[in-house]
Image (spheres, grey):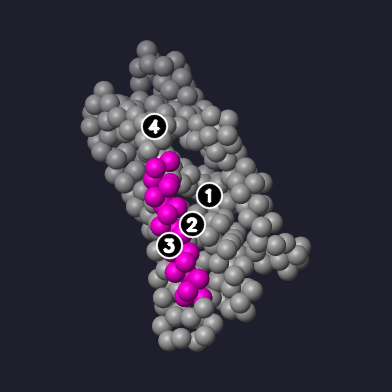
Amino acid sequence: MRRALLIFGLIALALAALFWSGADAAVARWAAGWQREFQNGLAGALRALRARDPGAFAALMGLAFAYGVVHAAGPGHGKLLIGGYGLSARVPALRLSIVAMAASLGQAVTAIALVYGGMLLLGYTRAQLTGLAEGAMSMVSAVAIGLIGLWLLVRGARKLRGQIAHEHHGDDCGCGHAHAPSAEEVARAHGLRATLALIGAVAVRPCTGALLLLVLTWQMGIPAAGVAGTLAMALGTGAVTVAVAVMAAFAREGALGSAPGAAALTRVMPVMEITAGAAIALISLRMLGWA
């Protein structure tokens, strides 16, 4: 069990060092530079598409997908949330990958709804739409992410407290309840509410690049291309987030694989939940500018 906790602790320390050392800011600057290059390319592809140039639509989709990949490669709270949850909760890698892709596609749906709802119903300008996404919607996302972190922290603390309270009991002590979850209960995937909460926390804040693309294509009279490009961006972002989800699942299983038996496993999981929950809550505070 000590080895499992050590492995997980090293993973947590490495992520914390990257996040708080300013290295994430350097990555953000690198990603922002590439995003500007892709935005210029997207503008050219849109002009070619409106002029009905052959291959313009395929070029637009490729550039939009690449933009999503680069955008996701920078510091992103969606990756951190999915990755942190994947480290702390024993959800299968495939299911966690589906959640990651659904969250990215949810961001695209939010962007489409915000742009067309804002422009058609409220008469918003691009600046107003961007301000809404970066302001109120970003705050809602930060609060939702923080609540998920607190939920993981509290749940892990409750499990750990229960184990400490009953560690002196035996299997036949007659106290009337289980001292710890079984191996099957530990391995069981979490419910629908947790899944929807993860997707919603990420999806509520749309990508500003998608907003720009949707507004431009609306103004140019090619709205279908904007919707398709936004979905392509989401697939690019989702590809990176899925990779993070898979790595988190493998890292988690590598740490738990060193736990000698189900009893040790049930003691490791609460510590992992507490650590990941605290990290996610701190990320939320930083998003809100409070840390």
Q: Position of residue 146 (x, y in %)?
A: 55, 36
Residue tagged 3: 37
Q: Circles 4 and 1: CB distance less than 8 Å?
A: no
Q: Is residue 63 magenta?
A: no
Q: Spot the residue most to the right.
A: 122
Q: What span is in magenta?
A: 25-46
Q: Choose the circle earlier in sequence order: 4 or 1.
A: 4
Residue tagged 2: 104
Q: Secondary structure at mark 1?
A: helix
Q: Choose the circle earlier in sequence order: 1 or 3.
A: 3
Q: Circles 2 and 4: CB distance less than 8 Å?
A: no
Rendered image quadrant of residue 164 = top left
Residue tagged 1: 202
Q: Position of residue 147 (x, y in %)?
A: 57, 36
Q: Secondary structure at mark 2?
A: helix
Q: Position of residue 67 (x, y in %)?
A: 43, 62
Q: Choose the circle earlier in sequence order: 1 or 2.
A: 2
Q: Circles 1 and 2: CB distance less than 8 Å?
A: yes
Seen in the picture, residue 9 relative to 87 is either above or below; the reply is above
Q: Which label is found at residue 21?
A: 4
Asked whether residue 119 is in view, the answer is: yes
Q: Circles 1 and 3: CB distance less than 8 Å?
A: no
Find the distance from the CA under tag 2 to the CA under tag 3.
22 Å
